[in-house]
Image (cartoon, grey):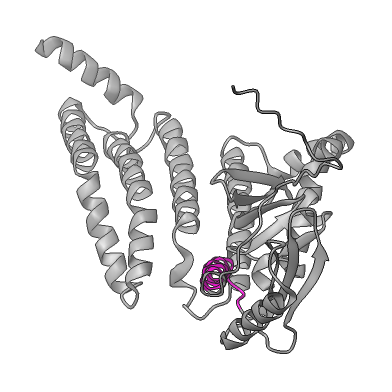
Amino acid sequence: MSDRLNSILSKLVTSIEGVKDEKEMLLRLIIGLAVFLLLALFRKQISKAIVWLCTKTIARKSDIAQRALVDALSVPLSFFIFVFGIYISTEIIAPSGEIRNPVLLIFKLGVIFSISWFLINFINSDFSFVLSDDDSKTKKTAVNFISNLIKIFIVVLSSLLMLEQFGISATRVFAALGIGGVAVAFACKDAVENLLSGFIIIYDKPFEVDDFIKIDNEVGQVEEIKIRTTRLRMTDGSQKIYPNTTVANSAIINLSRMSHRLINENLGIEYKHSSKEINAFCSKLKELILSYDESDKSDVRVNFTDYSDSSLDIEVFFYVDIPSLQDYLTFKSKFNCDVKTIADDMNIDFAFTSRSVYFANELEVKNNAK
């Protein structure tokens, strides 16, 4: 066993510059492996300690920033410590020689990857630490959109830096893209159009995140505006994804920006009611509408409008100062209940679809009973 170990150590001594004899080689191996195992086994604890120190010095004034930093840095830092363990143990074992080159390459790639990983994690984290409660939805939408652009930039830059480590310069990459520029431009046509449409949406601000909008006769709440797509949460709970070009070229109704909402209902009552009862019922309905603080008193219409097939129709038309859709539906429900209460108090019966049949000649009913 000792002869075999001595043989291995002798080969290492001859292949590694700067090592005098087998004893020094054995000592370097022991120290190098010990350092690697120490960093590999305790990398999570070391990572937590470094993150804790960063939160106390860099982001000590914001709990949200501390949480974002912890979430973004913990795992990439743990990975970097593992790669650093490989590098430093190799430096101890082989201070010079060819064995260092591949390890040095791995270390450089690990550094680039770890930094990119951390930055993307940080961008993906909660941005509320840079946005105050008073910031508009426009600012939040812009921050989310720009963060997606930054992530793409980080991925492209880190990829170019990694290629540089293999001897492939960014100039040669761009030159290759220039040769096939027409094909690339054609292939990326839709992506570029969606990107530009995304910029138009952010700049023009037809809607913002959390707005309720109507597009292509469908209503949904804007969840996110990305580089290529806009995502809506539909009223049935499903998520619908629109390309930004479709959104930018469509007629959009922003329901969240309504200062007033219209209530327009047709109430059908039975034909048995007299004109006096109809006028009294209309007056009561108008008094009810004017009693609401939310109603716009400048334009309230309650009129007997039509003789329908099965009912006498009364049109109710007025606006309410309720921008929120949910609050509007709550108010409309309350209004309908109040109308029903008035109708019950006045003995007004609502009509339902029916048909009366009249005969020109009286029917002769013969009683054959004996």
> What residue is rendered at 58% in x and 69% in y?
332
The answer to which quarter of the image holds residue 196 is bottom right
Where is residue 180 drawn, in percent x and y? 85, 34
* 60 relative to 176, above or below: below
The answer to which quarter of the image holds residue 43 is top left
**Residue 324 counted in the magenta span:** yes
Where is residue 56 drawn, in percent x and y? 27, 71
Of residues 349 and 89, which is closer to you in this image? 349
Where is residue 202 drawn, in percent x and y? 71, 65
> What residue is rendered at 85% in x and 40% in y?
361
The residue at the far right in this view is: 182
Query: If the image is split into quadrants, where does the C terminus sit?
Result: top right
Of residues 362 and 13, which is closer to you in this image? 362
* 114 relative to 180, above or below: below
Query: Is 213 placed left or right of 162 in the picture?
Result: right
**Can residue 278 be seen at all in this image of the molecule?**
yes
Query: Is 250 placed left or right of 259 in the picture?
Result: right
The residue at the far left in this view is: 2
Residue range highlighted in magenta: 322-341
> What residue is rendered at 60% in x and 72% in y?
139
Where is residue 18 drawn, in percent x and y? 31, 36
Q: What secondary structure predominates along the stretch shown in magenta?
A: helix
The answer to which quarter of the image holds residue 147 is bottom right
Query: Is 89 placed left or right of 282 in the picture?
Result: left
Of residues 33 and 74, which is closer to you in this image? 74
The residue at the far front in this view is: 370
Query: If the image is split into quadrants, where does the N terminus sit?
Result: top left
**Residue 314 counted in the magenta span:** no
> What residue is rendered at 51% in x and 81% in y?
134
